[in-house]
Amino acid sequence: MENTRRSFLKKVSAAGIGAAGLAMAGNAGATTTAAEPQKKKTAGKDDGKLRFGFIGTGSRCHEHINNVLAIPGNKIVAICDIQQGPIDSTLKHIAKFNVPAPKVYKGGEREFENMLNNEEFDCVIIASPWEWHVPMSVAAMKAGVPYVGVEVSAANTLEECWDLVNVSEATGSHLNIMENVCYRRDCMAALNMVRQGLFGEILHGGCGYEHDLREVKFNDGTHYNYVPGSGDLRMGPTAFAEAQWRTNHSVHRNGDIYPTHGIGPIAHCMDINRGNRFLSLSAMATQSRGLHKFIVDNGGENHPLAKVNFNLGDIVTSMIKCSNGQTIIVTHDTNSPRPYSLGFRVQGTEGLWMNDGDHVYVQGKSKPHRWDDSEEWFKQYDHKLWAQHSAEAAEAGHGGMDYIMMYDLIDAIRNKKTAPMDCYDAAAWSAISGLSEMSIARGGALVDFPDFTRGQWIHRQPQFAL
């Protein structure tokens, strides 16, 4: 136990809680004040290869690079970060593919604007700390980048959600939320079953992000500098551990701050923004206990982090009502000791899928009151993207879904199609964060969901993974 405690003290002293990351959060608010939208740039210039750029060069960037370069016909033009460590690591990673090194933009926290204005891209992927997703996406769209891929969650506030929609509409740039779980093999098979009517009319969905992130929130970085009474720990300038930005959201916010892994696949099953939409939301949160207990258990009551007041409730539950009548329960739980689960449940008038336990039940086909193993059903209803590309996906991250996601995006770019998961998806899914914070602050009050499509949802047709 003493060795464990010493290890924790060493790690947590290095990590702390902060918001440095790729850039400081204090400048993230100005999202729509850049120059007027420019003319979109031409695709596949010169050698015919699609030109990619990356803003944010951490481990998530490396996974995207793997798939961009694994698919023929692509090249990396430029990368951008404010820290030398991640840049060096990314350059070494790219060198393994025996391709030309990209141009590097580094230094100031607005250096990404220089990259966007000086280079021509067919697609820019943004894999930065959350508070920079919208400013960077907006800048890329206004710079004329035809396709912009933004990591999850795409936005933190309702205002930011509207920024993504408004700028995408104004510029004609395709914003794609990089929600890889939508391409998980079981999620795509379940979607196939929904579309083929196996579960009947869909009534209810369940999902969430239930992932013990206590170690992640206190992982290795550099020294912390605790300011008594500030409720914040600010990182040294060279740190790039995930804890320096992710954990600060647990200090200052109380809501479902990471909803898209769960809601994305359920939204596809319910045709959200395409014949259906989210109408309203009510959310509640438990006490905040897990992070403080983790610090005290591993570092002692006198550890500086034991003085931090964490605002995020350990378990946040949001209920959503849809226009077509369905209900959805979304759960956020990252501060508790528990196995990983996204808690998927898709239930209709004829049956349901529950991924915890790998259960499927189809009325008239399953034995009465007995679960089937979902594996047999999913073999039968495997989505064509997986059936066609499972060999290539086998080498990719997150069980292959990262490859399938990138393949689908690149197919859209080459064929000048709408983004697979567009600005309206990015806004609606991410809005759960701001709305849940609002509802919790009001004692669980029901809050209205904005219609980011401005009425277009009534006539829009499903497009994802058809």
Image (cartoon, helix red, strand yellow):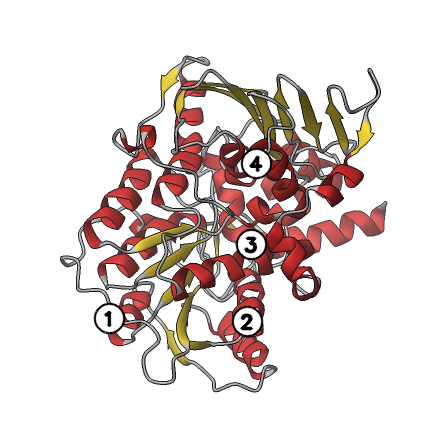
Which mark, by number, is residue 117?
A: 1
What residue is pinned by disc 3?
242
Per the image, the residue denoted by label 4 is 262
The kind of residue on which mark 4 rests is: Gly
| Spatial CA span between label 1 and label 3 | 28 Å
Mark 3 or mark 4, whichever is nearer to me: 4
Camera-side mark, 1 or 4: 4
Say which of marks 1 and 3 sits in front: 1
Specify few, some or many for label 3: CA neighbours under 10 Å numbering under 14, 14-19, or 20 or more. Answer: many
For marks 2 and 4, the one nearer the N-term is 2
Q: Earlier in the sequence, mark 3 or mark 2?
A: 2
- For the N terminus, the image quarter is top right
Amino acid type at circle 3 is Glu
* Rendered location of residue 18, percent (x, y): 48, 49
- Foreground residue, 411 or 248? 411
> Who comes first in sequence, dot 3 or dot 4?
3
Eyeballing the image, is 393 above or below 26?
A: below
Judging by the rendered image, the residue that carries numbered circle 2 is 71
For the residues bearing labels 1 and 4, Cβ distance under 8 angstroms: no
Label 3 to label 2, Cα distance in Å?
28 Å
Residue name at image x 35 percent, y 68 percent: 122
Q: Nearer the viewer, residue 6 or 56?
A: 56
Lateral position of residue 107 relative to residue 71, left or right: left
Compare marks 1 and 4 and give the one earlier in the sequence: 1
